[in-house]
Amino acid sequence: MNTVKVVLGFIELALGFKFLSIADQAYHWGILDREIFIAIWFLLALGLALYLFGLIRGSNETMVFRNEDTGWIYPPYFKFDSSDLQAEAAASISTAEPQQWVVVTHYGWRVRWLSIYPNAVAARPAPSEDYRPFPWVNLIIFAVMIGGLLFLRAMWLQFRERTVDPLADRVGDQMDHVNADLAERKGRISRWLDTWRKKK
């Protein structure tokens, strides 16, 4: 139910900015031009996507994990100790003060509307309730992925510049020659027909 409220809130914000944009255009206020409106809608859509993928959540929301072995298949985490991790998690349950906090290492996203859960890989003690570890590994993986995409884009642009564009130019030149040849032949036939008309 909380997810429905958040999604409706994002939709309400988006529609509110849309109506404000229409009023701004009608009365020429100059508050919300087209670029700002598109940027706001993009940020709202990005925020909604981050929320639906579980990357943004409220402080009172509980994170739900699954605990499954991956074995030798994809994704290659080679996790075989689901039972051990379950026992560690059960042993970490606090029954009295001071409470014991743990950091759960996981992969995957929590997508509520697809019933997808992140898979827990490990649990280790946390120094305090407010401890938030910085995901260095995730950051490095995403940086490498972005670098790889930029590299592929540069390769494609270079391939297009060296191979596709010259080929397209050659095809265009051939089409021009064919059209010119057809026009020349059509002109010869027209002239030949004109000579027969003159003889009549």
Image (spheres, grey):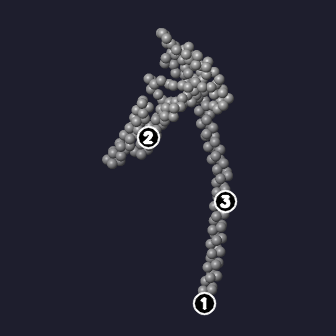
- Residues at discs 3 and 1 in contact (Cβ within 8 Å): no
- Secondary structure of residue under mark 3: helix
Three-letter code, disc 1: Lys
Pick whichever, 99 or 71, lies toward us: 71
Q: Residue lying furthest front in this view? A: 83
Q: Is residue 136 above or below residue 124?
A: below
Q: In percent of the image, x 51 and y 34: which residue is there?
A: 114
Q: Can you give x and y, in whole percent of width and height, for residue 195 in the image?
A: 63, 85
Left or right: 129 with respect to 28? Answer: right
Give residue 79's quadrant in the image. top right
Query: Crowding at label 3, few (<14), some or many (≥20) Cα neighbours within 10 Å?
Result: few
Please name the residue that numbered disc 2 is placed on. Answer: 41
Q: In percent of the image, x 56 and y 17: which residue is there?
A: 89
Q: Quadrant of the N terminus?
A: top left
Left or right: 108 with respect to 17? Answer: right
Q: Can you give x and y, in whole percent of width and height, for residue 117 in the image?
A: 54, 29
Pick whichever, 149 or 169, lies toward us: 149
Give residue 70's quadrant in the image. top right
Q: Which numbered dot is residue 200?
A: 1
Please name the residue that numbered disc 3 is placed on. Answer: 170
Left or right: 122 with respect to 27? Answer: right
Q: CA distance from mark 2 to mark 3?
A: 43 Å
Query: Crowding at label 2, few (<14), some or many (≥20) Cα neighbours within 10 Å?
Result: some
